[in-house]
Image: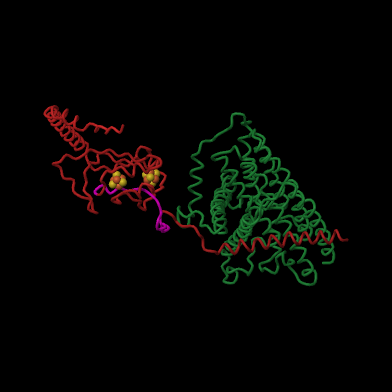
Chain colours: A green, B red
Amino acid sequence: MYEILNNIFGNQAVAWIIAAALPLFVFILPFALFAVWLERKVSAHMQDRLGPMRVGWHGVLQTIADILKLIQKEDIIPAEADKKLFNLAPILVFAGSYAAFAAIPFSSKYIGSNAEVGIFYIIAVSSFVVAGILMGGWASNNKYALLGAMRSAAQIVSYEIPSAIVILTMVMLTGTLSLDKFSQIQTAYFWNWFILGGPGDGLTKFLLIPFMIIGFTILYISTLAEVNRTPFDIPEAESELVAGYHTEYSGMKFAMFFLAEYGNMFAVSAVITLLFFGGYQSPFGYLGNSFNIPWLVPIEQVFWFTFKGIIFVFVQMWLRWTLPRLRVDQLMHVCWKFLIPYSFVNLIIVGIITLFR
Amino acid sequence: MNGLKQYFKDTWLGIWTVLVGMKVTFKHLFVPAVTIQYPDVRVKLPERARNRLYVNMDDCIGCDQCARACPVSCIEIETVKAVPGEDLGTTSNGKKKALWVTKFDIDIAKCCYCQLCVFPCPTECIYMTDVYEFSEYERQNLVYKFATLTEAEVEEKKKNFEKFTAEKEAQKAAARQNSSASATAKAKAEQKPEQPKTE
Ligand code: SF4
Ligand code: SF4
C-alpha cells in the first residue's frame, strides 16, 4: 500500500501519513459506527424490541448522532486523577487496537504492512491494550475503575495463553507467520479452508477437521475474553463495577475506549477468519476470474473479508445477548482448567498429524 | 478415569448449553417486536381510563360538591350569588343555575386522578378525558382555570351582589324598626304556657 501511495504522491511523508490514516477513516470508524448500531439492533430484536428507530431509516444514523453528542461533551478529569496517565490511557488502548489493523490483509492488494511475522505482531500489539486499561484504571483513582482494570489485566493475560497456543498450532501446520500467506494457502474455495482441514486431500485432511473445530472454538472463546465481551465482560460488569476501567471517562476519551472495543472486535474476528475461514478468499471462486476482469478480484476479496469478519462480530453480539456474565473464579476456571489443557492436547495431536502429511 | 469422563462430560455440557441458549435467542431475532412506536402509534386506552379532567362550565352550577369530594383539595371554587334580575339559564339536564362561578381552578399537578370528584356532580359536567400528554415546563401552568367569566365581569357580579345585599339589609333594618312594638307583644304571646298545677 505504502509503495503505491509513494508512487502516486512522490513524497514519502505524505504517502506514509495517508497509508497510516487510511484504515482508520476508511474502515475502523465506519465499521465502529455500523457495529454499534448493529449491536443495538441485534440486542433489541433478540429481546423482541425494536432498538433505535428515529434517526434515519431504522435508526442507522443513531451512532453518528451519538458521536456528535460525545464530541460536544465536557472533558472531565477527576481532581484526584493522575492527569498524564489518565489522558494517555485511552490513546494507548486505541493505538493498540488500531495497530493490529496494520497487519490485517483486507485483500491480496491491500495490506497495511505485509510483514512476515504478521500474526506474531498482532498478538504483540494487542497486549498493548492491557497496559492502557491498567493505566486508565489506576490513573482514575477510583475503586471501581481500579478493580475493573485489575480484572481486565488478569483476564486478558490468562486468555492470551490458549489463543497463543491455538495460533501456534496453526503456524505449525502452515509453517508461516505471514497473514497474507495464510490467506493464499486457503485458496478460493471453502473446502480449502482450515476449518475443513485445509488444502489438499487424503486422509490427513479429514483427520484434521475435528481438531480444527476444537482449535477454532478455543480461539473464539479466548479472543472473546480478550476483547472483554460478555460472557467475559467482567472488567466492565455494569452491575458490580459501574463501568469498570472507564468509569471516570467522558466525552471523546470514552468514545476512544468505545471505538477501541469495536475495533478490537473486528480485529479478533479478522484473525479467526484468517486462520480458519480462508482469510480474504471467496468461498466460491471469483467473478473477476471467471469473467476475466482482474481489477474486480481485490474488491471481491475486500467484500468477502469484511463479510466474514462481520459474521463473527455478529456471533459475538449474539453470544453477548445469550449468556450471563461469568464470575471471576469461573472465568479463571474455564481458562486454566479447560481451554489451556484442550489447546495443548490439540497442539500435540495436530503436530503428530502434520508429521505424517 | 471417572474423573476424566466427568471432565469431558462437563466440557460437552458447557458447549451444548451455550448452543441451546443461542438457538433460543436466534429464534427471538425473528419474533415480531412488541415495541409500539409511541408518538406515532398509540395504544387504545381502556374504556374507563382516568386522565386529565375537564369541566364543562356551561353545565356547572357551582355547587362545590366536587371540591369537597377531592381528597387532595386541588379544586378551588368561588361563587357569587346571582341577584334576582339576572338569568343564568339552565343546565342541559334542566337544573336552574343560581350562582356565578367566578373561580374554578383545578391544580392538575396535585390531582391524583382518583375520579372521586366526578361522581358527586349533579350535572355530570366534570369528567375524565382521554388526554394524557400535558407536560409543562412551569408547574404554574398546570393550574387549569375553567371559569369562563372575565375579571371585569367577576368584579361586576361581586358589586351587583354587594349592592343587592346592602339594599336588602337596608330594607330589613327598616322593617325591623316598624315591627319592634308588635314584636314585644308577640314575644309575650309566644311565652311558655303556664303549667297547670297538679297539687
Ligand atoms: S380526580 Fe381526585 S384528585 Fe383529581 S380533582 Fe378529582 S377528586 Fe381531586
Ligand atoms: S360538582 Fe359539578 S356542578 Fe358542582 S361545582 Fe363541581 S363541577 Fe360544578
Q: Quadrant of the C terminus of chain B?
A: top left
- Residue A68 in the image, given as x and y percentages of width and height: 48, 44
Work out whether residue A256 or residue A77 is closer to the camera in this orientation and state it: A77
- In magenta stretch: residue B47: yes
- Residue B135 visible somewhere in the drawing: no
In the image, residue A62 sits, relative to residue B184, either above or below, namely: below
- Residue A338 in the image, given as x and y percentages of width and height: 78, 55
Rendered residue at 79%/62% (across/down): B9
Work out which residue is located at the far front of the displayed protein and give it: B199
Q: Quadrant of the N terminus of chain B?
A: bottom right
Overall secondary structure of the magenta stretch?
Answer: loop
Q: Residue A62 vs residue A273: left or right?
A: left
Work out whether residue A301 or residue A57 is closer to the camera in this orientation and state it: A57
Work out whether residue A64 or residue B134 is closer to the camera in this orientation and state it: B134
Marker count (numbered): 0
- In magenta stretch: residue B91: no
- Residue A60 visible somewhere in the drawing: yes
Q: Which residues are magenta?
A: B40-58
Q: Quadrant of residue A249?
A: top right
Q: Residue A102 vs residue B81: left or right?
A: right
- Residue A134 in the image, given as x and y percentages of width and height: 68, 39
Q: Quadrant of residue A143?
A: top right
Rendered residue at 86%/61% (across/down): B2
- Residue B187 in the image, given as x and y percentages of width and height: 19, 30
In the image, residue A26 sits, relative to residue A194, either above or below, namely: above
Q: Residue A261 vs residue B66: left or right?
A: right
In the image, residue B76 sits, relative to residue A322, either above or below, namely: above
